[in-house]
Image: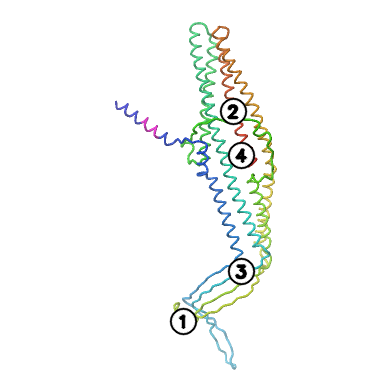
Amino acid sequence: MPSLFLAFLVFLTVSIQNSVASETLTLDQAIFKATQNSPTLQKAEAQAQEGRWRKIEGTILLAPSIELSANHFFVKRYQYLDLEFGGAPVSIPQIFPTSGATVEAKWLLFDGLANLDRYRAADYSKDADEQNFDWTRFQLQEDVTLAYFKVVANKKLKDAADQNLKTIQNHLEQIKKMRSGGIATNYDLLRVEAQVSEAQAEALQAEDNIQISKEKLGQLLGVIDPVSESVDVTGGDLDAPAASKVKDLKFDPNSSKRLDLRSMENRVAASDLQDRSSGKYWVPKISLGGQYIMYNNLTDGITDWDKYRAAWNAGVFLTWDIFQPAEFAKAKVETYKAIQNQKTLQQATVQAPVDFAFWKKRYLYNVTLFDAKKADLTRAEETLRLANAGFKAGVRTTTDVIDAELDLFRARAGIVNAQMNCVEAKTKLELALGEKI
């Protein structure tokens, strides 16, 4: 009795753990969970926020700056100025304020338009980051859709493999009985046993494929440990592929839907402007500026407010960095960053139509294969019916029946694989086009 109670507790604990660790989702729920939890999407969103603040920073650089400073000296030793009055030398201390506060305003008027280039570069970068975020979200939705249907397909393949294994095991039992009655031979028994082993291996592989596809889906959903925390799907069916969906599609490299390419173009524009801005380090800078100073050089008390006096100035300032080797190096860094961005865009632009053409052909091929597998399924079902009828009539052997059942299993698996390949090709085509088909 205690052992039965202990076994019940173990069963209950395992059941609770499985119910907690497993989460069953529809496709829409999976996409929503991914958009909420995906680190990749969260990183892209943070980059978009960074781009917006970078533009604000660029805007502020065009505006005047105001700086407040204050000082108070606890100890001091004056400098002395030596003068002669009537031939007699006199040393006069050069008194400086013990306490003071300064408000300084400065407005950069001209630096070769480098500040305007930086602002425009920040604007392009902001647009690029926002487009990259939208593209990352679209790409994540496509990846989740593909991973979701891979779980669906692997489950269907597992069901077919289990059914095939069960059928062959039933035949094995029949062969054993027939061998005992002298109807079947050892050859028949060994052949069926080999087929059982093969079917068992296929069923195990199908089970592993389900687990692997679930882990991939969990990874996309942002699950912390997709190996132990199982994510499952509610079911669903694979779409019936049709050539009419894609046969008239054409690739447009200038389509606004390809947000990844548009993002790269904006990054190229931003890097070109940043390069041009950094190359103007040698240009003289002209600024407007002014100071308002409150100071006390009469007493040492920081709170002697009646002793403070005011001074102010305003004017035009010119600065010119004649020799700045570090700025020259920084300018070269920006130059080669711009070249890298240009080549990245060039590679992506060349690759995009190639990807589109490949996945379009892949989809159309698998549509043809799907139609062929449907015809194979019809023939396999009829062949199995005839084999069973012939076996009952004594004109067919168990080998003929098993071969017909294996052909039926392969036809069913072939249909699922063709459907899954079409789902993958359709997903990649949508990524190539930048929009849903």
- Residue 139 lies in what quarter of the image? top right
Which residue shows up at 59% across the image and 29% down it?
240
Whether residue 6 sits left or right of residue 164 in the image: it is left
**Observer-nearest residue: 149 or 275?**
149
Q: Check if mark 3's residue and mark 1's residue have beta carbons within 8 Å.
A: no
What residue is pinned by disc 4?
436
Q: Is residue 12 magenta?
A: yes
- Residue 16 lies in what quarter of the image? top left
Q: Check if mark 3's residue and mark 2's residue have beta carbons within 8 Å.
A: no
Choose the circle earlier in sequence order: 2 or 4. 2
Residue 191 higher or lower than 302, as above or below: above
| Number of the front mark, 1 or 4 | 4
Name the kind of residue labelled 1 in the image.
Asp
What residue is pinned by disc 1?
306
Report the Cα–Cα distance between label 1 and label 4.
Answer: 75 Å
**Rendering coords of residue 260 (x, y %):** 63, 46
Question: How many residues crowd mark 3 within 10 Å: few (<14), some (14–19), many (20+)?
Answer: some
Which residue shows up at 63% across the image and 59% down it?
119
Name the kind of residue labelled 3 in the image.
Trp
Choose the circle earlier in sequence order: 3 or 4. 3
What residue is pinned by disc 2?
417
What residue is pinned by disc 3?
107
Residue sitting farthest toward the top = 182
Residue 31 circle label? none
